[in-house]
Amino acid sequence: MSLLTRIQSELQILTDAERKIGEYILEHPELVPHMTTKDLSEKTGVSESSVVRFCKSIGMTSFKTFKLELVKFLTLSETNITDFSILQKKDLPYDLFKKVTYVNKMAIESVLSSLDRKELDRAVDLIQDARKIIFYGVGGSATAAFDAHYKFGKLGFQSIMTQDFHYLLSLIPYLNEQDVFVAISMSGKTKDVLDLTKFAKRKGTKIIAITNIDKSPLYKEADLKLCTPVVEQDFRIGAISSRMAQLDIIDAMYISVFNRIGEDKLEQYCEARNEVLKLRR
């Protein structure tokens, strides 16, 4: 039974205040993931405590958990564009552009609910003090790993990213507790990512996982979890919204580190910029 079907079936046994919340959600499901309990209470004319009780009445532990489940339902149902059901409808390119924009926007905004603020703060601390940083992901997650490697390399970090599994096997023995291994995997079950993560962990290297909020094997191995919402299925035509969520977290880490050390790097940034301008002439 889907989340919205469950709400519909339980409307009759909810209190009046909870029923108002349920009816609003059924009418405007796409708006709720970006709301706070205060927002939803104001829209429905009930108290914030009623919103919390509503979530518990339908089997959710918290409003945050409810929003994540709602995001998962919305992105994996009729708005989903990354599974093979897209072949059943022959949309025009501009219609597909609007759908892509919608799911990417929803994925990015939903990271606000899946990401733990304290974990992000600690991850930025680790990155800032790291001797070496290895970013690793395969498939669609390799794109995010390369983007992170590129950005932190520009800040002067000894940043490493390669898709060569065996090359990384040869590098990991040189890592220690001063280094950071950033493992990127939507499912958190990719064997190559897990094998390298476990190897790096045995060397005392700190592990940061960028992975779905589901408690996967990678989630359990990591010292710090930067969680993305579940916005795509494993079996899909390509990573789209999941990649956007990963890139959003990487951009947040990059800007946070730059905010702390950027003044010390301005000379190098300007030097590089001047060389770029010379090459354009």
Image (spheres, rainbow, N blue to C red):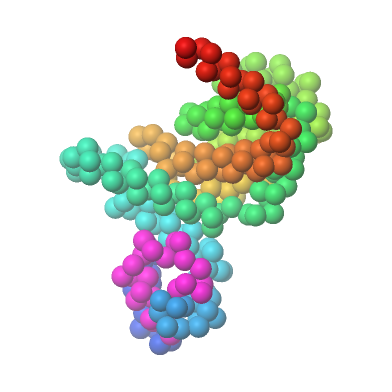
Q: Is residue 23 magenta?
A: yes
Query: On the rendered image, what quadrant is the N terminus found in?
Result: bottom left
Q: Which residues are magenta?
A: 17-40
Residue plotted at (42% across, 36% down): 239
Foreground residue, 280 or 49?
280
What is the x, y in percent for residue 260?
71, 41
Q: Main secondary structure of the magenta part?
A: helix
What is the x, y in percent for residue 204?
80, 33
Side (left or right) of 125 relative to 55: right
Q: Is residue 133 visible?
A: no
Query: Please, is residue 138 above or below residue 29 in the view?
Result: above
What is the x, y in percent for residue 161?
61, 23
Side (left or right) of 142 relative to 10: right
Query: Please, is residue 130 above or below residue 242 in the view?
Result: above
What is the x, y in percent for residue 31?
38, 63
Residue plotted at (63% across, 54% down): 116
Residue plotted at (71% across, 36% down): 263
